[in-house]
Image (tube, grey):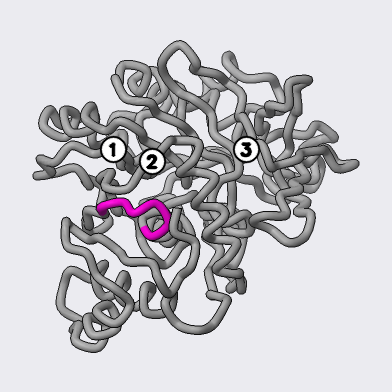
Amino acid sequence: MITEERTQCITLNGITYNAQEIKELNQSVTDEPPVILRDLYAFLDDWYSPSPTLVVHTSGSTGTPKPITVLKEQMIKSAQLTCDYLQLRRGDTALLCMPLQYIAGKMMVVRALVAGLNLLIREPSGHPLAHLHSPLRFAAMIPLQVYNSLQNPAERQALCGIEQLIIGGGAINSTLEEEIKTLPGAVYSTYGMTETLSHIALRRLNGPNASSHYQPFEQVKLSLSDQGTLVIDAPSVCAEQLVTNDVARIFDDGSFTILGRKDNIINTGGIKVQTEWVEEQLRPLIGTDFAITSVPHSQLGEAVVLLLKHAENINTDTLRTQMDEFLPKYHSPKYILITHSIPQTGSGKIDRAGCKELAQRLMEQH
């Protein structure tokens, strides 16, 4: 592992560059596509600068994205945790197909710097494996990219050629997880956030070690707050103990599961409804984009709302009957609101605040 920033070289598409060469590339790059190269050179130029810190931005899935200043040393330690766990070695080929505005993309670059990986560059898109003919030792993708790749025979073949795949940035529904089980390489779901500099735990999705529980890295200590949310103590990547908004359950062996976010709990008639749980139950019934949110209600306090992207093949009366039969009484949405699109953050997650605002506007129009 190479842990001194100034001595780290980066191998991009098979060509190795040092700090000075990256600076020259950054100075000569234009605004012409591919944009990811411009962002990559700019990030690397910042990485090689004398400053011990970098500014990263949260994804904004539960509010406005905010900047966070982090130590490069902590990013290196985070990269070491992943590279050691997955046994990544110098010369291994890895895929960068994530936006560099967010921590997931930045950490793929840092892992390449630390472990000496050969980084293949792809403009972030829903089809990162299109026209990719090189076998990959390691890749990181979001669920949508994996889903899209599974639908195309050539891309599916490329997906099968990835030895170590980590998936983050959003929930993996049960249907996708079943398809992932057919992949020959090792596939993991990640748990982490910007504040922990990417993931601090992995969950194996396929093979004999597949599990419904996340396993934290050895250096990570976990506990629960008084409100049942996960508390992370990982001094190597996060200087202070982090109290998350994720409602969790910790098991005797140290593994854990995430039930949902505390700020995504809807209190309707005194019953606490976990938004993510309802979405997971409804996913097999709904063949289009949707989200569960809430609106104020004079009697219930909050009413559960299904925001549904318009689709010709969905009959809302039939869906209403199915939901009422399928879900507990207070968990079944009281209102179904049709919209042209579901609000998303820049990183592709459901924009919870945006969904709530949209639901209130749609209700006012009724």
Tell me if 83 is positioned left or right of 72 in this view.
Answer: left
Q: Distance between the residues labelled 3 and 2?
A: 16 Å
Above or below residue 316? Residue 1 is: below
**Camera-side mark, 3 or 2:** 2
Tell me if 105 is positioned left or right of 261 in this view.
Answer: left
Q: What stretch is highlighted in magenta?
A: 113-118
Above or below residue 319? Residue 77 is: below
Residue at left offset 39%, top offset 44%: 142
In the rendering, which numbered label is found on residue 217? 3
**Element type at mark 2:** loop
Residue 334 in percent (x, y) is at: 63, 34
Can you tell which quarter of the image residue 12 is in? Answer: bottom left
Disc 2 packing (10 Å; few <14; some 14–19; many ≥20): many
**So how many labels did they put on this image?**
3
Q: How far apart are marks 1 and 3 (CA)?
A: 21 Å
Q: Which amino acid does label 1 sit on?
A: Arg
Question: Mark 1 or mark 3: which comes first in sequence?
Answer: 1
Q: What residue type is labelled 3?
A: Phe
Residue 236 in percent (x, y) is at: 67, 55
Residue at left offset 54%, top offset 34%: 202
Residue that extends furthest to the top in the rendered view of this protein: 208
Q: Which residue has dot 2 on it?
A: 88
Q: Which residue has dot 1 on it?
A: 137
**Element type at mark 1:** strand
